[in-house]
Image (cartoon, grey):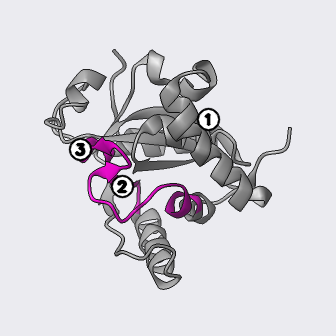
Amino acid sequence: MAHGKNQAELLELVLEKGRSIAIIGGGCFWCLEAVYQEMNGILHVESGYSGGSIKNPAYREVCTGKTGHAEVILLEFDPTKTSYESILEVIWVIHDPTTLNRQGNDKGTQYRSAIFYLDEEQRLLAETSRLAAEETALWPDPIVTEIVETDVYYPAEEDHQNYFRNNPGNAYCSFVVKPKVDKFKAVFRDKVHQL
């Protein structure tokens, strides 16, 4: 099992690689991973867990809702090709940030909408982005997305990585993940990476 990285270790990783990092949650991590893998400037997407109380959580434990972890993705991105603000602009559209602990039929605290910031700059950008989404009335109900400081991020098990790419025929992928990917490509044509 992969061990977690705390905030300091994640920031050190940023310095080492010359990349930026974002950690966000918005329902099932398979959906978010598939969408952001299509976004220009995203160098790596990893599904994982954050915001919980136990060390090295496993998927079966997180699914109980008792660990306090959210399913999240960790994005490594090239800040010369995309921005933290652009990443957040997408999250408000591709999931419903107004449903508490739920996305569609996926229910539980592990599916909560959350932005885990690494530093004060990310916190301010996340709050500004949430306010902009509220002011544009993108959603009819109030946004309930948490904006919380990153404590420890844990990568999910290998079989959860690249899930949509590896399981395109899976029913969940066909009926839940693919529509989100299609929505991203339709709404954010300018953000889709070009091969």
Query: Could you tell which of marks 2 and 1 lies nearer the N-terminus?
Result: 1
Query: Could you tell which of marks 3 and 1 lies nearer the N-terminus?
Result: 1
Q: Disc 3 marks which residue? A: 108
- Check the picture and name the quadrant holding the C terminus: top right
Q: Disc 2 marks which residue? A: 113
Labelled disc at residue 44: 1
Q: Residues within 10 Å of mark 3 (few under 14, many from 20)?
A: some
Q: Residue furthest bottom?
A: 135
Pair 2/3: label in front: 3
Query: How many angstroms separate mark 2 from mark 3 (CA)?
Result: 11 Å
Q: Is residue 180 above or below residue 5?
A: below
Residue 114 belongs to magenta span: yes
Query: How many angstroms separate mark 3 from mark 1 (CA)?
Result: 27 Å
Within the image, what quadrant is residue 194 found in? top right
Residue 155 visible in the shown view: yes
Cβ–Cβ below 8 Å for labels 3 and 1?
A: no
Residue 19 visible in the shown view: no
Residue range of the region highlighted in magenta in the rendering = 90-119
